[in-house]
Amino acid sequence: MADDVFLSSTNFYAVVSDRDVVLRVFTGDEQVSGTSLLLNGSPVPFDSPAGPQVIGQGKDLVGSVLTVNTTVRDVNPATNHTSVTHVLEGGLETRAFPHAIDVSADKGTAHYLVTFVFTA
């Protein structure tokens, strides 16, 4: 844990009243990852890192906060670079939120704590 690296980010995402908001998480650089979600402090199941996860309908999400915690483990011997892209769909526009950091040693761990605030 002492060699772990951390990245945090807060983003705003405008939702549309009658559309479901969907999250997708993509891990780059041939690394492996796991993701957990909290919506307004309550856990939300997240089964597939590359699959879509419905967060809720826009009208119910305005003012809500989604916390996405993606942990990436460096398993690629060619690089210590890690990257994660969180994609939100169903709002005013589909938006990708890319982030990247290097771990400090082979087999290191990167923690991406990304917060989304849903707005009208």
Image (spheres, helix red, strand yellow):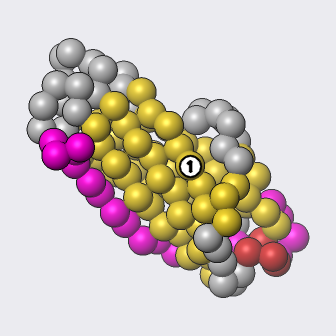
Q: What stretch is highlighted in magenta?
A: 1-20
Residue 11 magenta-highlighted: yes
Q: Which residue does the numbered mark 1 point to in the structure image?
A: 36
Quarter of the view holding residue 16: bottom right
Label 1: how many Cα within 10 Å (few below 14, some 14–19, many 20+): some
**Residue at (22% x, 33% y) in the render:** 108
Quarter of the view holding residue 75: top left
* Residue lying at the far right of the rendered structure: 18
Q: Which of 107 and 94 is in front in this view?
A: 107
Quarter of the view holding residue 88: bottom right
- Estimate the x, y position of residue 78 in percent, counting from the top left: 19, 17
**Residue at (81% x, 76% y) in the render:** 60
Amino acid carrying label 1: it is: Ser
Number of numbered discs overlaid on the protein picture: 1
For the N terminus, the image quarter is top left
Is residue 57 shown left or right of residue 7?
right
Residue 115 magenta-highlighted: no
* Residue lying at the far front of the rendered structure: 1
- Estimate the x, y position of residue 70 in percent, counting from the top left: 45, 46
For the C terminus, the image quarter is bottom right
